[in-house]
């Protein structure tokens, strides 16, 4: 089983299943943020690193990060990376 940068096992993602793959990635990371496993201000792995961890296309991880940004959980800083923000209450 594949693991993420925090050493947690990644859930199985079925590309032909009903759940959208980018949502599975986003929901996994969102859960970590909401449980405090990813601290406010901490940097997420790069899109390429996330793609390699999950075994998905880079566009999939890019869309997952955009979903997290739309939820107010992360903020992308051009040239620096993507950082955890305070979850919306």
Image: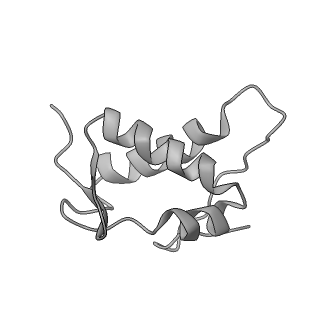
- Rendered location of residue 49, percent (x, y): 56, 71
Q: Residue furthest top?
A: 18
Q: Compared with residue 17, is residue 5 higher up or lower down, i.e. above or below?
A: below
Residue found at the very far right of the displayed protein: 16
Query: Which colour style is shown?
Result: one colour
Q: Picture coordinates of residue 71 (x, y %)? A: 31, 33
Seen from the viewer's position, the closer of residues 81 and 18 is 81
Q: Tell me which residue sits at (51%, 49%) in the image.
A: 62
Q: Quadrant of residue 70?
A: top left
> In this rendering, would 11 be left or right of 29?
right
Q: Nearer the viewer, residue 45 or 78?
A: 78
Up the image or down, 35 lies above or below 52; here it is: above
- Quarter of the image with the N terminus is bottom right
Residue in view at x 38 percent, y 65 percent: 44
Q: Quadrant of residue 73?
A: top left
Residue at coordinates 20% horizontally, 51% vertically from top-left? 85
Left or right, 3 with respect to 67, comes to right
Task: Give percent across and percent down for residue 19.
Answer: 68, 30
Q: Is residue 1 above or below residue 17?
A: below
Please identify the quadrant where the C terminus is shown: top left
């Amino acid at each position: 089983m594949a693991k993420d940068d925090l050493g947690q096992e990644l859930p199985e993602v079925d590309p032909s299943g009903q759940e959208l793959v980018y949502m599975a990635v986003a929901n996994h990371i969102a859960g970590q943020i909401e449980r405090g496993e990813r601290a406010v201000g901490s940097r997420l792995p790069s899109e390429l690193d996330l793609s390699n961890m999950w075994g998905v296309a880079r566009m999939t991880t890019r869309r997952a990060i955009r979903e997290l940004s739309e939820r107010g959980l992360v903020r992308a800083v051009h040239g620096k990376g993507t950082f955890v923000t305070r979850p919306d209450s």
